[in-house]
Image: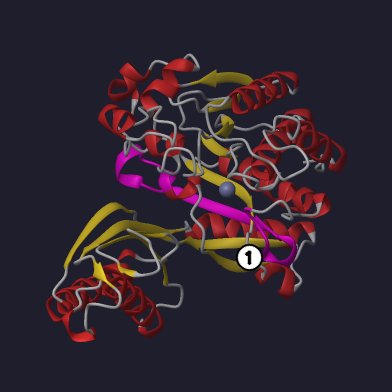
Amino acid sequence: MDQTASVKNLEQWIEELDQFNQTPGNGTTRPVFTAEDMAARSYVHKLMESVGLEVKEDNAGNLFGVLPGEDPSLEPVWTGSHIDTVPNGGKYDGIAGVFAGIEALRMIKESGAPHKRSLSANVYSGEEMSRFGVCCIGSRAIAGRLHLEDLKSHSDPSGTSLYQALKDVGYDPDSFDEEFPCKTPVYASLELHIEQNDVLEKSNYPVGAVTGICAPTNMVVEVFGVQSHAGGTSMTARRDAYMAAAEISLLLERLALESDSMYITGTVGEMTLEPNAANVIPGHATFSVDIRSVTIEDKDALLEKFYSGIKEIEERRKVKVTTDMMNHDKAVICDEHIVELVRKGSADLGIPTMDIVSGPYHDSLMLGDITKVGITKVGMLFVPSKDGISHNKAEWTSIEDIAKGTDILANTLLKLANEA
Ligand SMILES: [Zn+2]
């Protein structure tokens, strides 16, 4: 291909998209299906058309910018990411991958390089879980892991359900169960994303070939103890909900540290106590548990020990503990063939790459659910995040690195689109 990625395009598109922001001057805030998100979508829609892509949309709000191939009967090759953000987040997370995908297709189109399979640069709805408590809304729907009843049971903090939010912005959520999982099999998917860690930066590589994507398991744990007087209740008579919650949290940390898995993490990020007063022993504690790893077996092994440890703490401390599993997602091992194409493609272009595992999840995690959609090949490319910072207004990635990643992306997509 005679084209290289345009730094100017990538920079301009990223800057222009950032005008659709609820918190200018204090990071980027663009929750899914808000006015800002819808305006950002229409910007991307117009951009896709302006570079010559055919734009399609589904009822989960996913946008597809299609570059038709010579043989429309062949399964297409996908790229893409998301444009929603966490509150006061950055302007690269997801966005870099959306524009890299569009730029890659522009390069392929303008180079006139023939390709048998159609190519599609996509925007997946609501990858961040911050508005509705469910992550990867669009790609989850595509994979058949989000249903009409789920749309009604997930609500934002103001009480608007995901179902209502979809309706309010003009989609037809009632057709959800007919439309999804996506009926057309996909040949391969390759997503570019910022790393959100500092491995590439520290190792001095502009691009990483992702070999696996860790998946989250999320649960809500509740401890029911007995609320009583901080001075009047002796230490031995207490049924302290907080101390039990603290012990369960430390158990999680110990199990993650002791695991043989290289990538497992255990996090308690949120805790509320009742009544939450300095002189009262808490009677009720509610907290979040987030466990991630690159294989589900690692997580299952940890969970088994976690549950039996909880049982022991429950009996010893005479409290009641309930666990409510929100999701238990399967990690994805990236397709070895795509990883190899990425490595080889970067060597041909003279761009050094290293293999890397993704701790955070991405839309590709859902797209790798091969049993539902028939996507057999999933891969990702990472570009460095300055100081490893993301989900923060200080998030920054060099446009030159995004352009290098886009060059590899375009060349790999073209190869995939010509495979039989
Ligand atoms: Zn992201």
State the extent of the magenta-drawn residues as a range: 366-391
Is residue 231 positioned above or below 282 on the image?
A: below
Residue sitting farthest toward the right? 8
Q: Residue at x 34, y 74 (%)?
A: 246
Position in image of residue 226 (x %, y %): 19, 66
Is residue 300 positioned above or below 380 on the image?
A: below
Is residue 376 positioned above or below 387 on the image?
A: above
Describe the element under mark 1 as helix, strand or loop.
loop
Classify mark 1 as within 8 Å of ligand 1 or not, answering yes or no: no
Dot 1 alpha-carbon crowd within 10 angstroms: few under 14, some 14 to 19, many 20 or more: some
Residue sitting farthest toward the front? 232
Q: Nearer the viewer, residue 138 or 257?
A: 257
Q: Would you say 75 lies left or right of 346 here?
A: left
Position in image of residue 196 (x %, y %): 63, 59
Q: Which quadrant, please, contains the N terminus?
A: top right
Residue 251 in magenta stretch: no
Q: Nearer the viewer, residue 336 or 361?
A: 361
Residue 387 appears in the picture as rendered: yes
Q: Amino acid at mark 1?
A: Asn
Residue 59 appears in the picture as rendered: no
Q: Nearer the viewer, residue 50 or 93?
A: 93
Residue bearing mark 1:
197
Q: Residue at x 43, y 59 (%)?
A: 270
Q: Would you say 403 lies left or right of 222 here?
A: right
Query: Residue 340 falls in which quadrant of the image?
Result: bottom right
Q: Nearer the viewer, residue 349 or 311?
A: 311
